[in-house]
Image (spheres, rainbow, N blue to C red):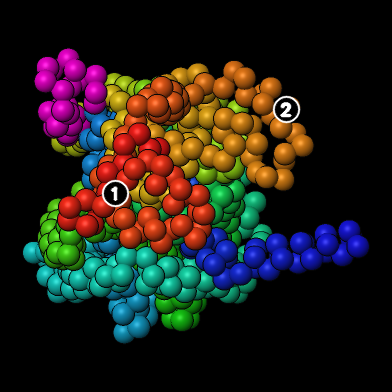
C-alpha cells in the first residue's frame, strides 16, 4: 500500500515538472543563454585572448561572480515584485544604482541593434551579391608565413560601415533596418511578457537548430586543436582578459542590465530561485564553450580578426575560403540575427517594465518615445563609425557594469544585512539557504574591484599613441564621473523624500527599508512579516497579529484536548502583547463591578406590562413576583415600575 502511495506521489510530481507552466521558464533560460553574449562576444574574446584561456577565465568568473549576483537579483526581484529601480526601497539611498542599470541596458541596446541590423542587412546584400573568393578572400603574404585577413575586414568597412559621405546608399539601407527594429520592439513588448516569451521560444530554438546544422556541414574537427595555443597562456598575467571575463559573465547572464530583476516578477515568478540561478549560469557556461568551439570548427586554423565585428568577418572569410554556397552564408547570418533579437528583448525589457510601472495608462507612449531616442542615438553612432561602437562596448559599458555590481551587492549584503537577505531568500525557498551563497556575495566586491582597478591603471600607464585621441581614457573618466553624478543626484532626492524633519534623521532613514518594501501581494506580505517576527519572539512586534485558536490555553484545536497540560506548560513563558493584557484586565474589572453593584441595581422603566404577562407561561413564577413587588401599570398603561427587581 505504501509503495502505491509513493508511486502516485512520484507520478504527480513528474506531471507537475513536465507541465507547460513549469517548462516555460527554462525555455526562456535556454533562449537567453543563446544571446549575443555566447554567440558574438564569447567568440570575439576567444579570438583576442585565446580560445581555451578565455573560456577558462570566463568560467571561473561566472562561478565566482555571476552565480552569487544572479541569485541576489532574481531573489529580490521575485520577493519585492519590482523592477531594477523599485527594489531599492530596501535601501532608498542607493536608488541611483537602479537607474544606472537601466542606462546600461539602453547603451548596450545601441550597439546591439547596430550589430543586429548589420547581420539582417547583409542577408539581403548576400542574396543579391553572393560572396566570391575574389571579393573577400584571404591573401597569402609571401614575406610572412601566415594568413592576412585584412582584406576581409575591408569588405565591411567599404560597404555598410563606410563613412556616410562615401557610401550614402549603404548607410540609408542600414539606417532603415535600425529604425524598423526600434519601431518593432515597442509592439513586441506591448503585452510585456506574453509575446516576448513566445518570440524567445521560437528564436532560441532556431539559433540552436541552425548552429547544429551549420557545424554538421561546414565544421571540421581537424580545426578544433587550433583552440589550444601555448602562446595564449601569457594572457593570464594581463588585466584585459580578467576584466573582460568578469564583464562577459555578467552580460551573458543578463545581470548587467537588470533583466533578472524584472523577470523575477514575471517569467520566474513561480520558480525556485536557487535552481533557476544554477540552470541559468550553467547554460551560459555550456553555450559559451559551444560558441567558441563552433566558430573555431567553422572558421578554420587561419588568423582570426579581433575587432568588435570579428564574427561577421569570420563568416565572410569562411565563405570565401571554403567556397560555400550562398545559402550557408545566409544561414550563419540568420543565426546571428535571431540571437541579436533575443538580446534586444532582454535588454529592453527592464526599460519597458519601468515605463509600465511609472507611466500609468500612457506607458506605451513613453516606450515609443524611448524608441525614437534610441533610433536617433543609434544612427548617430553609425555616423561616427566603428570606433564609437568599440568605445561603448569595450570601455563605457564595462566600467558601468563593474561599478554597479560592486555597489549593488555591497549595499544589500552589508547595509540591508546579509542575515535579513538570507531570511528573505529562505522565505522564497521554504528551506535553508546554504552558507556558500553568503560567502559568494561577500567575495564579489573583493574580486571585481581589484580587477577593475588593475584594468584602469594599466589603461592609463600604457604608452600613449600621440597620433590618436585618447578615447579609451576619456571614456573611462567620463563613465565613472557620470555614474558618480547620477548616483549622488538620486541619493539626494531619496534623502529629501524622507519624512523626518532634520537632515541627519533623513539621512539615517534613507539607509533603512521604506514602508513599501516587501511583496506587493497583501497575503504574501502578511506571511513575509510573520516569518520575520518568528525569528525573534522577544523583540516587540511591529504590527497587530491576529489571535489564533488556543493561543493562551496552548490547545491548537479541539482534537488536542488530551495534551492540554503539556501545552499549557509550554506556554508559561509566552509573552502576550499589551492589547491582550488590557482586554483580560478590562473583562475582570467589569465582572467585579457588576457583582458589587448587584444589590442596588435598578431596571429601566421600559418593560411593557403586556410583554411581561405574555412571558408568564414560560416563567410560571413571574406573575407572583410581579404581584409581590406591587408593580402596577403606569398611568399611560404601557410601562411599569420595577423597584429593586433584578
Mark 1, secondary structure of its residue: loop
Q: Mark 2 points at which residue?
A: 565
- Closest to the observer: 77 or 366? 77
Mark in front: 2 vs 1: 1
In the rendered structure, the answer to whether residue 486 lies left or right of residue 214 reads: left
Q: Residue 238 carries which label?
A: none
Place of residue 544 in the rendered image (x, y in percent of width and height, measured from the top left): 39, 34
Quarter of the image where the N terminus is located: bottom right
* Magenta stretch contains residue 213: no
Q: In this view, does 125 lie above or below 596?
A: below
Please report the bounds of the magenta region as a residue range.
485-510
Q: Does the magenta stretch include residue 498?
A: yes
Nearest the viewer among 183 and 142 is: 183
Q: Is residue 560 left or right of residue 112?
A: right
Label 2 Cα crowd, 10 Å radius (few <14 / some 14-19 / many 20+): few
Other residues around mark 1 within 10 Å, as few (<14) / some (14–19) / many (≥20): some
Q: Which residue is drawn at 14% across and 32% down?
A: 497
- In which quadrant of the rendered view does residue 402 lie? top left
The answer to which image quadrant residue 394 occupies is: top left
Q: Earlier in the sequence, mark 2 or mark 1?
A: 2
Q: In this view, does 120 lie above or below 402?
A: below
Is 158 positioned to the left or the right of 80 in the image? Answer: left
Distance from disc 2 to disc 1, alpha carbons, whole Å, reads 56 Å
Could you tell me if the residues under marks 2 and 1 are in contact, i.e. CB atoms within 8 Å? no
The picture places residue 379, in percent across and down from the top left corner, at: 15, 61
Image coordinates of residue 342 in percent, x first then y, are 39, 64
Which residue was labeled with disc 1? Answer: 632
Magenta-drawn stretch, dominant element (helix, strand or loop): helix
Horizontal placement of 278 versus 89: left or right?
A: right
Front in this rendered view, residue 633 or 35: 633
Q: Circle 2 sits in a helix, a strand or a loop, which is it?
A: helix
Amino acid at each position: 500500500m505504501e509503495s502505491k502511495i509513493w508511486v502516485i506521489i512520484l507520478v504527480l510530481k513528474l506531471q507537475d515538472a513536465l507541465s507547460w507552466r513549469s517548462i516555460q521558464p527554462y525555455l526562456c533560460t535556454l533562449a537567453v543563454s543563446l544571446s549575443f553574449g555566447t554567440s558574438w562576444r564569447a567568440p570575439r574574446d576567444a579570438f583576442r585572448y585565446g580560445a581555451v584561456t578565455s573560456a577558462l577565465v570566463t568560467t571561473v568568473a561566472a562561478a565566482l561572480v555571476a552565480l552569487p549576483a544572479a541569485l541576489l537579483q532574481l531573489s529580490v526581484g521575485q520577493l519585492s515584485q519590482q523592477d531594477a529601480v523599485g527594489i531599492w526601497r530596501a535601501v532608498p539611498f542607493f536608488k541611483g544604482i537602479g537607474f544606472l542599470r537601466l542606462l546600461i541596458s539602453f547603451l548596450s541596446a545601441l550597439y546591439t541593434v547596430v550589430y543586429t541590423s548589420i547581420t539582417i542587412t547583409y542577408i539581403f546584400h548576400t542574396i543579391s551579391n553572393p560572396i566570391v573568393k575574389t571579393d573577400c578572400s584571404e591573401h597569402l603574404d609571401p614575406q610572412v608565413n601566415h594568413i592576412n585577413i585584412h582584406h576581409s575586414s575591408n569588405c565591411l568597412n567599404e560597404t555598410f560601415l563606410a563613412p556616410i559621405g562615401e557610401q550614402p546608399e549603404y548607410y540609408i539601407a542600414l539606417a532603415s533596418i535600425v529604425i524598423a527594429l526600434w519601431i518593432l520592439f515597442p509592439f513586441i513588448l506591448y503585452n510585456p511578457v506574453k509575446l516576448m516569451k513566445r518570440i524567445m521560444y521560437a528564436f532560441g530554438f532556431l539559433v540552436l537548430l541552425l548552429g547544429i546544422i551549420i557545424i554538421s556541414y561546414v565544421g571540421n574537427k581537424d580545426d578544433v586543436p587550433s583552440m589550444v595555443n601555448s602562446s595564449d597562456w601569457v594572457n593570464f598575467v594581463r588585466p584585459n582578459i580578467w576584466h573582460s571575463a568578469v564583464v562577459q559573465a555578467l552580460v551573458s547572464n543578463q545581470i548587467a542590465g537588470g533583466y533578472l530583476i524584472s523577470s523575477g516578477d514575471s517569467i520566474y515568478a513561480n520558480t525556485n530561485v536557487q535552481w533557476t540561478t544554477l540552470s541559468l549560469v550553467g547554460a551560459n557556461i555550456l553555450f559559451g564553450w559551444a560558441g567558441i568551439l563552433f566558430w573555431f570548427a567553422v572558421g578554420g586554423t587561419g588568423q582570426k580578426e579581433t575587432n568588435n565585428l570579428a564574427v561577421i568577418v569570420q563568416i565572410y572569410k569562411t565563405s570565401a575560403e571554403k567556397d560555400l554556397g550562398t545559402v550557408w552564408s545566409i544561414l550563419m547570418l540568420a543565426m546571428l540575427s535571431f540571437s541579436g533579437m533575443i538580446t534586444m528583448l532582454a535588454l529592453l525589457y527592464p526599460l519597458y517594465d519601468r515605463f509600465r510601472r511609472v507611466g500609468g495608462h500612457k506607458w506605451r507612449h513613453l516606450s515609443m518615445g524611448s524608441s525614437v531616442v534610441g533610433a536617433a542615438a543609434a544612427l548617430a553612432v553609425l555616423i561616427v563609425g566603428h570606433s564609437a561602437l568599440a568605445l561603448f562596448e569595450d570601455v563605457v559599458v564595462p566600467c558601468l557594469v563593474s561599478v554597479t555590481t560592486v555597489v549593488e551587492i555591497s549595499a544589500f549584503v552589508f547595509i540591508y544585512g546579509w542575515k535579513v537577505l538570507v531570511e528573505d531568500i529562505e522565505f522564497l525557498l521554504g528551506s535553508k539557504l546554504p552558507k556558500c551563497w553568503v560567502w559568494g556575495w561577500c567575495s564579489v566586491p573583493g574580486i571585481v574591484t581589484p580587477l577593475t582597478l588593475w584594468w584602469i591603471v594599466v589603461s592609463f600607464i600604457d604608452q600613449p599613441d600621440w597620433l590618436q585621441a585618447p578615447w579609451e581614457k576619456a571614456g573611462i573618466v567620463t563613465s565613472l564621473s557620470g555614474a558618480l553624478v547620477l548616483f549622488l543626484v538620486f541619493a539626494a532626492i531619496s534623502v529629501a523624500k524622507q519624512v523626518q524633519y532634520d537632515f541627519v534623521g533623513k539621512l539615517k532613514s534613507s539607509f533603512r527599508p521604506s514602508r513599501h518594501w516587501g511583496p506587493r501581494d497583501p497575503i504574501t506580505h502578511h506571511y513575509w512579516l510573520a516569518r520575520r517576527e518568528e525569528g525573534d519572539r522577544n523583540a516587540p512586534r511591529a504590527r497587530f497579529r491576529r489571535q489564533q485558536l488556543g493561543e493562551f490555553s496552548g490547545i491548537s484545536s479541539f482534537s488536542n484536548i488530551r495534551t492540554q497540560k503539556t501545552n499549557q506548560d509550554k506556554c508559561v513563558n509566552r509573552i502576550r502583547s499589551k492589547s491582550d493584557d488590557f482586554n483580560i484586565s478590562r473583562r475582570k474589572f467589569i465582572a467585579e463591578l457588576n457583582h458589587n453593584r448587584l444589590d442596588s441595581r435598578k431596571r429601566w422603566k421600559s418593560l411593557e406590562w403586556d410583554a411581561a404577562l405574555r412571558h408568564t407561561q414560560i416563567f410560571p413564577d413571574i406573575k407572583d413576583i410581579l404581584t409581590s413587588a406591587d408593580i402596577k401599570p403606569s398611568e399611560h398603561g404601557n410601562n411599569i415600575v420595577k423597584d429593586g427587581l433584578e
